[in-house]
Image (cartoon, rainbow, N blue to C red):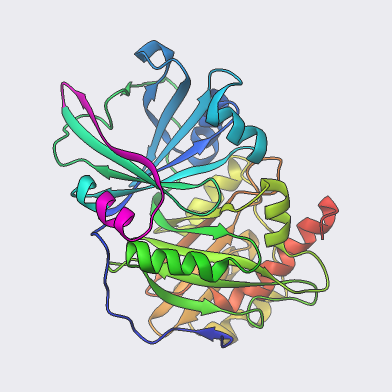
Amino acid sequence: MTTATKPVAETAHDTFPINGTDYIEFWVGNAKQSQLFYRAAFGFKLVAYRGPETGVRDRASYLLEQGKIRLILTTPMGPEGEIAAHIAKHGDGVRDMAFWVDDCRDAYAKAIERGAVSVQEPTVLKDEHGEIVVAGIRTYGDTIHSIVERRNYKGLFMPGFIAADSPFQPEPVGLKYVDHCVGNVELGKMNHWVQFYSDVLGFYNLLSFDDKTISTEYSALMSKVMSNGNGRIKFPINEPAQGKKKSQIEEYLDFYRGPGVQHIAVATDDIIRTVRALKSRGVEFLTIPRTYYETVLDRVGKIDEDIAPLAELGILVDRDDEGYLLQIFTKPVQDRPTLFFEIIQRKGAKSFGAGNFKALFESIEREQAKRGNL
């Protein structure tokens, strides 16, 4: 594999059309407290609730929204069952990255025919607003993809959920949609999951990065970016590479106890405003040396933004053939050094910030060293 390659263009051959990300569901130890964090810190709005008060006895779930992003935070009502077991093993983390499709039954049948492992056969959920059809398939680790059909439903979100309201209504911070979700897998498993997304879902390999691109003096990783045909779903898949010390991927795998979602990238139209708002609410970001900003414009050329606020906030800049992007990464959002968020603003660029990898990874290594995990 070459250093940073864009594979020869492949013809889109999606197994089934995907309209976009329907929702991302987290399984967490205390959803009541977690939903308050995502509202207060990230500006999400509480929209709906499902739990014992709605007739669901084994879990409580809170639906949060901002822009086109939907997060579900779910917690078990006791120590029994798969949710509690998932949390005991992984800590708080992403369980489900759900696809929105036009025909769930057809999509599920095609995925199973191509080798997917079933989590849930197509199931019809009904209420007075119509019906939703949901199925599920497995991906890396204990993560799944639900397949959601909404064409015959006019309700708020999904049967079983009721509208929720609160006098606490923090302002949104400008998050628009899910740009991409990154998965970490074990050494030697990246190409297996690349093949899965290609064979089962008809995704194609948009970009590849080897350990010469994503490396520092101490650690390295390899990554391949998988995309569906319309580009609305992008899943970079990372695996560790040989280095002098433990890579961030190895640290993640150690603390998550296996493969899982490393970070969720969410888009904004004004990254400076968004990051200022997030920082004012206590969200912590990785720090970038000031020396990065002394030469960044020599590398990326002219940009619309003043470099001073970018340097103040630690926002990274990179350019490709179609434009440039601005990006910044939070520290992990729980005590285990696992899941974090990326805030990204695209000004034409369709890449993933390869020019920033060294600065970013050195910043991550500084945090690993503080934790004694480098």
Tell me the quarter of the picture where residue 132 sits.
top left
Which x, y percent locates residue 157?
A: 28, 32
Which x, y percent locates residue 27?
A: 53, 35
Q: Is residue 352 above or below residue 1?
A: above
Q: Farthest residue toward the right?
A: 372
Q: Is residue 227 visible from the viewing direction of this image?
A: no
Q: Residue at x 83, y 73 (%)?
A: 244
Magenta-drawn stretch contains 119: yes
Which x, y percent locates residue 47?
A: 35, 29
Q: Quadrant of the C terminus?
A: bottom right
Q: Is residue 337 left or right of residue 23?
A: right
Q: Quadrant of the N terminus?
A: bottom right
Q: Is residue 8 visible from the viewing direction of this image?
A: yes
Q: Residue at x 60, y 31 (%)?
A: 85
Which x, y percent locates residue 24?
A: 43, 44
Region in magenta? 108-129
Tell me the quarter of the picture where residue 66 sits.
top left
Magenta-drawn stretch contains 37: no
Q: Nearer the viewer, residue 133 or 110?
A: 110
Q: Is residue 104 left or right of residue 340?
A: left
Tell me the quarter of the picture where residue 358 sits.
bottom right
Q: Nearer the viewer, residue 86 or 341?
A: 86
How many numbered markers are drawn? 0
Q: Residue at x 60, y 38 (%)?
A: 92
Q: Is residue 124 left or right of residue 317?
A: left
Q: Is residue 126 above or below residue 193?
A: above
Q: Is residue 185 above or below residue 302?
A: above
Q: Nearer the viewer, residue 108 or 265?
A: 108
Q: Nearer the viewer, residue 324 or 58?
A: 58
